[in-house]
Structure formats: C-alpha cells, structure tokens
Image: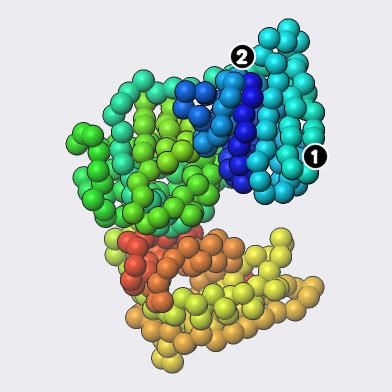
Amino acid sequence: MKIVCSQIDLKNSLSLVSRAVPSRPTHPILGNVLLVAEKGKNQVTLTGFDLTLGMRSSFTAEVEERGTITLPAKLLNDIIGHLPDGEVSFSFDEEELDDNPMVAINSLSGKFQLRGVRGDEYPELPTIDTDDKFLLPVTALKEGLKSALFSASSDETKQILTGLHLTRDGDSLEFAATDGHRLAVAKISEEIETDDSSNFALTIPSRALRELEKIISTSSVDDFVSLYVDEGQIVFELDNQSLTSRRLDGAYPNYNQLIPKTFERSIVVDRKMLINSLERVSVFADGKNNMVKFNLIASTNELNLSVEARELGNAKEVVNVEITGDDFQIGFNIKYLMDGLKAINSDNIKFSLNGATQPVIINPLSGVDMTYLIMPVQIKD
C-alpha cells in the first residue's frame, strides 16, 4: 500500500468512524479502524465496527499502490489530529509476511511508524442484498429526531424501548420514542421519494440514530439520506458516509392508545418563559427530590411553580398563563419536563390535563406536529 491524502480529509473521516470503535473491545482488532485503498477509484475508505454499529467514510486520495490494513483507532486519531494541514502519506509492504506489518506515516512535520494488523482479520460489516431504497429528506430527519429521540430509554434491559420507532405512511414520517415514563411522537409531512410505494415500520437503536444526527448536522436542507432495510439490518447513506446498524427485535408498544383524547383543563404558556422559570427553581432539585409542583390559579391565570428540598430550602416562581378549567395542582419530574420543553420548537405550548395522576399532553402551537406525553409525579401530603 502507498497513498497520499489530505490531512483534513483523513482527520474528518477518522473522527467519524472512530465513534463506532468500542473503548473496551471484546477482541483486540475491534479497537482498530480498517483502511482500504483502491487504486482504480483513487479512493480511501475507513471503517469502524463494534459488531453492533458500523460506520464507514470514503475520501479521494492519490493511491499509488492499493492495499488493506487495520490500525489502532485511538493512537491513529492522536497522530493525525496533531499533524499540520497538508499531505499525509501511508505506506507498507503488502508482500511482507508479518501479520502485524509496520506502517510508515509521513507528513510535513515528521515521520511515524505504527504497527498494524492485516485487514483480512477485520470483521465484515453486514450487507443488505437489495437495491430498493427510501430517500428521506434531511430536514425531516433532523426535525423528527430532535423531537422524539430524547425520550428513548437508556436502560438496556428494556430492549425495544431503547430504540426509536420510525414509520413511513404515505407522504409522512412518524418518529416515536418512550421509556415508560414519557412518550414523544413527531409526525413530519414531506414528499418522501422512494424506488417503490411501500411503507415501513422499524425500531432503530437510539445510539445509531444519535450518530446519524451528527452525520446530518452539517448537511444541506436539500439533501436526502438513503435508507436500505432488510429483516435484520438497516443502512443509512449520505454522500460518502454510511452507518450500518441492527434492527431491534420485537413489537413496539401501541403508543397511540396511551394518548388521551379528551381533557378537563388546559394551560397555554410561553415556552421560553416557562423554561427560564423552571431552570431557576431547579437549583433545589436533586437526586432525592426532582419534583416541581404546578399550582394553577384559574381566577388570576397564574401558574405557581415550587421546588422544595427539606434540608436546603425551597424556590417559588409565578408564571403568567392562560388557564381553561378550574384550580388544580400536579407534580412533574423536572428533568423529564425540561427535556420535552427543550425539544419543542414553538414560542407557545399547550398543556392538556385530566387528573393529578393521569397522563399530561404537551403540544406546540406552531411548527412540528409533536405530542409529548409525560406521567405526573404523585404529590405526597
């Protein structure tokens, strides 16, 4: 192998694929990245894979001799990240019989030698044997993931709830995630282009989608992400980058039946004003007490917020709101509440409520069609 490439191209691709390299690999080679140089295409492809999530990135390079090698991801990142802008060359003798050849890395600032492992020992990424693909607008993905992904469970024992349920139905995408305490659903209507007219419903690990968020974060609003699906795997592709992940097995809960259809009272409030007030009173919320009390005063259209920490003190604030219904008191987990409010992109929001122990629905009054369901916390006398 002998290649010459741009330091910035190499650094960017390496940074991307390294996110799929485990910090504590179950096998030493999984701590490496795979580097493949193709002479005919004058292209270098990097791959990181932890046997669950795989990430791949390609860039143009001058390939004098093709080759394949794996190199320690962390050490390679440290080396390339500290090199100055300019050309970087990689070379090693493919005819060398050693299974762990020494790779020479040269730049304007110096020379390095790094011990590698031959590429044929690296596990292959799962492939999807289909040319059928769905083209998903980047704007729809950004909005849907921001609106729902935060509600997925971080508890690995909950399996299916650690993912986001993505549904295509006609000309819309629906994103849904729940951890059992809250539920976020976002419906994005777009002109979804595809090679066929079929719909889909699949549950994708939240970790994979957080990486997808990073990939599309700098993309143009006119870009589309290609989605390939089979029974066990999914692949997202955008330009020269791809992400491969397993699908989560099992039936996702029928979340629509959890959402109440009628309500006894409602609150309309300025979202940013409420967030600011909650952030101030939350200084008294800790691991022992993370509840904020809402006390609705219908006659004055006031929402009294309060957080109490018995050993420290308490905080109270009054927020002007529009109340429909009677006086009422209810408690929320302040973190869950703040997560939902920050995911909404609307100046004003509406709380729809029934009893003090029944689900509460929060909707934006403009922007993305989003529903956030949060279970109240019981207030102890």
Reading the image, the residue beneath label 2 is 120
Q: Secondary structure at mark 1?
A: loop
> Compared with residue 138, is residue 331 higher up or lower down, i.e. above or below?
below
Residue type at tag 2: Asp
Q: Quadrant of the C terminus?
A: bottom right
From the top left corner, tell me how far across and down residue 196 is, in percent.
Answer: 21, 34
Task: Judge by depth and name the residue closer to the eye, 41 or 183.
Answer: 41
Count every numbered label the image shows and give the total.
Answer: 2
Q: Residue 166: where, in percent of width, then height?
A: 37, 43
Mark 1 — residue?
Answer: 110
Residue 336, position as x, y percentages in the image: 55, 61
Residue 31: tell me if it is visible: no
Image height of 348 relative to 298, above or below: above
Which residue occupies the foreground of this view, 126 or 242?
Answer: 242
Which amino acid lies under the numbered mark 1 shown in the image of this protein? Gly
The percent position of residue 270, horizontal first and vertical second, equals 44, 80
Return the residue nearer the eye: 38 or 259.
38
Say above or below: 188 vs 95: below
